[in-house]
Amino acid sequence: MELPFQLPPLMQNGPYPIWTGHDFQIGNERTKVLHYSTNNAGWNDDLTSYHENAAGDNHFIDQASRRYTLNQLKKNLALTKPSILEIGCSSGYMLQKLNQLFPHATLIGADVVYKPLLELSKRLTIPLLRFDILQCPLPDNCIDAIILLNVLEHIEDDVATLKQIYRILKPNGVLILEVPAGPHLYDAHDRICMHFRRYKLSKLCQLITKQGFTVANRSHLGTFIYPAFFLAKLWNKRLLSKPDIEQRQLMEKKIRRTSQNKFLSALMQMELMLGKWIAYPFGIRCMVSCIKPS
């Protein structure tokens, strides 16, 4: 499988990387992960480990966000062989679902951290790129769909990020975006996770449309579990006086425990089912799908 666009050299006047279908060939060298640039200001390997240990692939809210993403792609992406890029792919749970749903698509994973990409290369044979989105190496108008789940809040300059995404999306391309909702809910967990902010859905949509996108769908995720989440956030704020390591241990334990809660999981499944017809006015995450006009 060839990439539908030419990747730039890793350094000026260097050889162009070639995706062989199994790895990248750069001159006489071969590599599973292509390194362009890094900026770990809002994420690092340690945070990846924290998230994996706390939630992994099993947390019901993350599973719900992936189902929302897949539904929106099926609805808005009419191509039979699209190119789909996930920025912030981490351990690749979303990419593995995409590989099942879009078997003929060109899937590409990207992140700023190396270790998860290397581990992912052992499970999925797809192009994996390491770069900072603010220094995105991809050419203009080259991708049919971009997925950005729980990434934008980790980047200080969210406007510049959206401009880069708009640049590399093809006309009529699809962007699926998820961010934490509710600025008033910012707490110790957000700080430990290196979130620069939480978003209000209306302001997020304004930010998106100012960059040229058309919003196709907007809603919240976690409406049915919001009361429990709100109480948990109040509990988290009590942790601010504790040492960081103790805060992290307590929250990791709580997230791991709630991820197995069958009642909350059933509520999320019901919410997703009704969400086919309802746009929820509040929740714990903002979900937006948008289109780059032709």
Image (cartoon, rainbow, N blue to C red):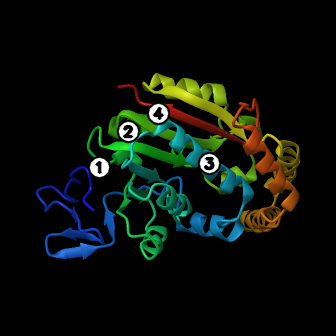
Q: Kindly identify the amino acid type of the residue bearing the numbered disc 1.
A: Pro
Q: Kindly identify the amino acid type of the residue bearing the numbered disc 2.
A: Gln
Tell me residue 243's x, y (percent): 76, 64
**Where, by quadrant of the figure, is residue 165 drawn?**
top left
Q: Quadrant of the C terminus?
A: top left
Front of the two marks 2 and 3: 2
Which residue, given by chain and number where applicable, does mark 1 sit on? 137
Q: Residues within 10 Å of mark 3 (few under 14, many from 20)?
A: many
Q: Are marks 2 and 1 in contact (CB under 8 Å)?
A: no
Residue at the far left in the pictured view: 13
Count of numbered circles in the view: 4
- Residue at position x 71%, y 32% from top? 277
Disc nearer the start of the sequence (4/3): 4
Q: Kindly identify the amino acid type of the residue bearing the numbered disc 3.
A: His
Which residue, given by chain and number where applicable, does mark 3 sit on? 195
Looking at the image, is 67 positioned above or below residue 246?
above
Q: Is residue 169 left or right of residue 53?
A: left
Disc nearer the start of the sequence (1/3): 1
- Residue at position x 81%, y 61% from top? 242
Q: Are marks 2 and 3 in contact (CB under 8 Å)?
A: no
Tell me residue 35's x, y (percent): 32, 63
Tell me residue 168's x, y (percent): 33, 40
- The residues bearing labels 2 and 1 have C-alpha atoms spaced at a distance of 10 Å
- The residues bearing labels 2 and 3 have C-alpha atoms spaced at a distance of 20 Å
Q: Which mark is residue 129?
A: none
- The residues bearing labels 1 and 4 have C-alpha atoms spaced at a distance of 18 Å
Disc nearer the start of the sequence (2/1): 1
Q: Which mark is residue 164?
A: 2
Q: Are marks 1 and 3 in contact (CB under 8 Å)?
A: no
Q: Which mark is residue 159?
A: 4
Q: Is residue 220 left or right of residue 177?
A: right
- The residues bearing labels 4 and 2 have C-alpha atoms spaced at a distance of 9 Å
